Every structure is written in C-alpha cells, then in structure tokens.
Image: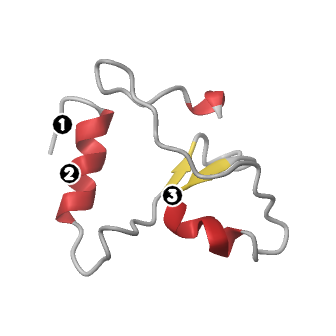
Amino acid sequence: MIMRNDKEAIQVCIRTCTGVDKDRIRIVRIANSLNVEHIMLSEAYYEEAGNIPGLIVESEPKELEFDEEGALADLHAW
C-alpha cells in the first residue's frame, strides 16, 4: 500500500492492527537501526521503559510532530 505521507501511513498501520488496544498503541521509532543510540517510544511504553536496566528515559511523552504536508519531523530533532 502506498500512502500520501508519513501521517497517513502511520494512521493506516494503526487502523489495520487487529487484537491490539488502539488506545494504547505500542510503537517504536528508530532513526537508524545500525546505530540505536536513541529511540522514541509511544506513550504506552513510558512507565515500562523506566524499569528496563540500561535504558535511560530522556523525556516525557509528547505528540509526534508532522509538517504541513504530513511528513514526520526530523528524527534527529528529538
């Protein structure tokens, strides 16, 4: 499936997931899978993440940011 932009692609992925709590979607955003120094976790992971040894929680949950064309904000901006 081809979507017009990042925002639509994420929305379709969530809508088509079955057997998941759509109010507590678990998403991991990785800028570079060859260098996983920083990742962004969806809010559903927030409390759990603080209990994982070696994982440092650097910020509170926040909304994904999209530009006016629906593209995700730069991964390196976080």
Mark seen at residue 3: 1
Q: Comparing marks 3 and 1, which lies closer to the viewer? A: 3
Residue topped by disc 2: 12
Q: Comparing marks 2 and 3, which lies closer to the viewer? A: 3
Q: Is residue 61 left or right of residue 19?
A: right
Mark seen at residue 42: 3
- Residue farthest to the top? 68
Q: Is residue 25 left or right of residue 47?
A: left
List x then y, in percent, for residue 75.
57, 33
Q: Going from the N terminus, do you reach mark 3 or mark 1 first?
A: 1
In the depicted structure, whether residue 50 falls above or below residue 42? below
Q: Amino acid at mark 1?
A: Met
Q: Going from the N terminus, do you reach mark 1 or mark 2 first?
A: 1
Label 3 neighbourhood size at 10 Å, few (<14), some (14-19), many (20+)?
Answer: some
Q: Is residue 48 left or right of residue 19?
A: right
Label 1 neighbourhood size at 10 Å, few (<14), some (14-19), many (20+)?
Answer: few
Q: Secondary structure at mark 1?
A: loop
List x then y, in percent, for residue 13.
26, 55
Mark 1 and mark 2 in contact? Answer it, CB < 8 Å: yes
List x then y, in percent, for residue 31.
58, 40
Q: Amino acid at mark 2?
A: Val
Q: Label 3 to label 1, Cα distance in Å?
A: 22 Å
Q: Going from the N terminus, do you reach mark 2 or mark 3 first?
A: 2
- Which residue is rendered at x = 39% and y = 65% of the image? 25
Mark 3 and mark 1 in contact? Answer it, CB < 8 Å: no
- Residue farthest to the right? 54
Closest to the observer: 34 or 14?
A: 14
